[in-house]
Image (cartoon, rainbow, N blue to C red):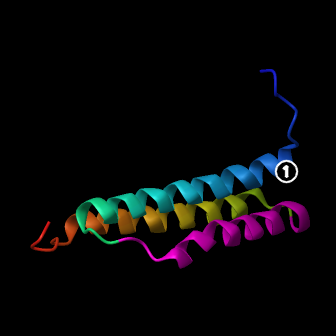
């Protein structure tokens, strides 16, 4: 409660959205390392920046909450489905 209001709402909304994306990427990377013994390609770590830019556009320019939420949901869901697919695909014989 001490820091309430210290960060403006616009920065907070965009930062939290990018953090959700980054959490999904870390979860997929950890799952790939555990199950398959391989790491996620580093290009995926640019997607939180892309989602933050799109969310900033729908916050500052068009101010559309539904589209901003849809963009974040699609991004997080894509990584969640990919994580689930890692568990359903047969693993390497060495693991």
Query: What residue is at 53 percent from the left and 54 percent from the top?
Result: 23
**11 and 60: which is toward the camera:** 11
Q: Is residue 37 left or right of residue 71?
A: left
Percent across and percent down for residue 65 are 76, 56
Farthest-out residue, top: 1
In the rendered image of this protein, does residue 53 appear above or below residue 4? below
Indicate whether residue 41 is drawn in magenta. Answer: yes
Q: Quadrant of residue 62?
A: bottom right
- How many numbered marks does the figure carry? 1
Instruction: Name the element at disc 1.
Output: helix
In the rendered image of this protein, does residue 19 appear above or below residue 4? below
Percent across and percent down for residue 52 are 72, 64
Residue assigned mark 1: 10
Query: What residue is at 62 percent from the left and 73 percent from the top?
Result: 46
Q: Is residue 22 left or right of residue 89?
A: right
Percent across and percent down for residue 69 are 66, 58
In the rendered image of this protein, does residue 40 appear above or below residue 4? below
Q: Quadrant of the C terminus?
A: bottom left
Q: Main secondary structure of the magenta part?
A: helix
Farthest-out residue, left: 93
Q: Quadrant of residue 40?
A: bottom left
Percent across and percent down for residue 20 are 59, 53
Q: Quadrant of the N terminus?
A: top right
Q: Which residues are magenta?
A: 39-62
Query: What residue is at 33 percent from the left and 66 percent from the top?
Result: 32
How many other residues sit within 10 Å of disc 1, few (<14), some (14-19) or many (≥20)?
Answer: few
Query: What residue is at 32 percent from the left and 72 percent from the top?
Result: 38
Q: Is residue 82 left or right of residue 48?
A: left
**59 and 31: which is toward the camera:** 31
């Amino acid at each position: 409660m001490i820091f309430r209001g210290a960060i403006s709402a616009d920065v907070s909304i965009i930062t939290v959205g990018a953090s959700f994306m980054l959490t999904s990427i870390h979860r997929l990377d950890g799952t790939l390392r555990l199950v398959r013994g391989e790491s996620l390609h580093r290009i995926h770590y640019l997607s939180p920046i892309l989602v933050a830019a799109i969310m900033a556009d729908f916050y500052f320019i068009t101010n559309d909450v539904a589209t901003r939420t849809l963009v974040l949901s699609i991004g997080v869901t894509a990584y969640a489905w990919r994580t689930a697919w890692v568990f359903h695909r047969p693993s390497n014989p060495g693991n």
